[in-house]
Image: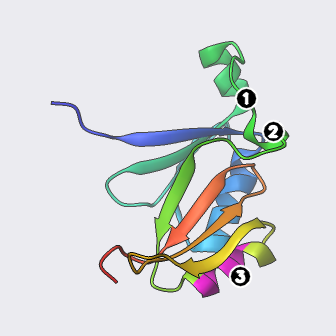
Amino acid sequence: MIKYGYTIVYVSDVKLTLKFYKEAFGLDCRFIHESGDYGELETGSTVLAFASHQLGKSNLSNAYVHAEESKMPLGIEIGLVTEEVEKVHESAIGKGAVEMRAPEKKPWGQLVSYLRCPSGVLVGLCTPINA
């Protein structure tokens, strides 16, 4: 059996990225390696982690697109679920995120918004699907 365990996003500064996610979204740091090259957020059973481009280069010979250097966001989204989409959306903008799409009600009832974080990562905020 395979279990989805984690997502690792390669970033320029792991500590600053963890700080942004704490300040913008209230997600606590679960672990950071003493080197500062790898850290995880407290996100429940599936881990959201960040690793430095230096570590990425050692793993992948730098053969990937650096999200913060791409003019457009990458075609992948980190989805965060909250009952307070508007409040969290504005908080993230105040901490340095760029609005990609303001909160809007979808036909199936969810309130959804999109932000691009300082690390270049696309984050979708949404209410629970049954809200």
Q: Secondary structure at mark 1?
A: loop
Query: Looking at the picture, how far across and down is residue 65, in whole percent?
Result: 73, 29
For marks 2 and 3, the one nearer the N-term is 2
Q: Residue at x 77, y 74 (%)?
A: 93
Q: Where residue 90 is drawn, which disc sits there?
A: 3
Amino acid under disc 1: Val
Looking at the picture, tell me which residue is in the foreground, 27 or 70.
Answer: 70
Count the labels in the image. 3
Q: Residue at x 69, y 12 (%)?
A: 61
Which image quadrant is residue 5 in?
A: top left
Amino acid under disc 3: Glu
Q: CA distance from mark 2 to mark 1?
A: 7 Å
Do tag 2 and tag 1 residues touch (Cβ < 8 Å)?
yes
> Residue lying farthest left?
1
Was residue 90 drawn as part of the magenta stretch in this picture? yes
Query: Looking at the picture, how far across and down is residue 10, in whole percent?
Result: 65, 36
**Few, some or many C-alpha atoms within 10 Å of disc 2 (few <14, some 14-19, many ≥20)?**
few
Query: Looking at the picture, how far across and down is residue 84, in whole percent?
Result: 52, 86
Q: Is residue 81 left or right of residue 92?
A: left
Q: Which residues are magenta?
A: 86-92
Helix, strand or loop for the magenta stretch, by majority: helix
Q: Secondary structure at mark 3?
A: helix
Q: Where residue 70 is drawn, which disc sits there?
A: 2
Q: Where residue 108 is drawn, which disc sits there?
A: none
Q: Secondary structure at mark 2?
A: loop
Q: CA distance from mark 3 to mark 1?
A: 28 Å
Q: Residue at x 75, y 55 (%)?
A: 16
Residue 29 against residue 13 in the figure, above or below: below
Do tag 2 and tag 3 residues touch (Cβ < 8 Å)?
no
Q: Which residue is mark 1?
A: 65
